[in-house]
Amino acid sequence: MIKVDEKTMINDILENVKNELTTYQQVISETKNMQLRNTIQQIRNTAESFQYELFKIAETKGYYKTAESADQKQIEKVKTELEQ
């Protein structure tokens, strides 16, 4: 019997939802039918909310570490590079 810990399960689910969100975005951008497009957008929005709630749980439990915050100088540098 394989035992999977909570941290592994949460991180796997987060990765799967991230992949789903990418797929939803691709489908939305290629869908002409507005009713179908709106439905997929609603599904995507629900998945994004789920992902964020699970992310908050993972972060609280120490399963996920966010990057350090950038200072204003670093932000401006990246912004300038992207605008060129």
Image (tube, grey):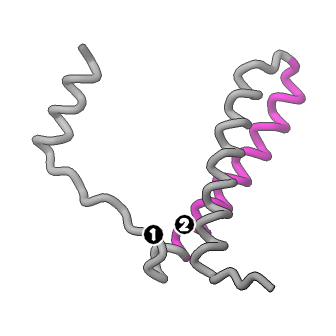
Residue at mark 1: 64
Q: Is residue 79 above or below residue 65?
A: above
Q: Are marks 2 and 1 in contact (CB under 8 Å)?
A: yes
| Percent x, y of residue 10 | 63, 71
Q: Residues within 10 Å of mark 1 (few under 14, many from 20)?
A: some
Secondary element at tag 1: loop
Q: Is residue 56 above or below residue 15?
A: below
Looking at the figure, which quarter contains the C terminus?
A: top left
Residue 79 is drawn in which quadrant? top left
Which is more toward the observer, 28 or 17? 17
| Percent x, y of residue 83 | 27, 18
Residue at mark 2: 55
Amino acid type, residue under disc 1 in the picture:
Tyr
* Mark found first going from the N terminus, 2 or 1: 2
What range is drawn magenta here? Answer: 33-57
* Residue at 24%, 57% in the rendered image: 69
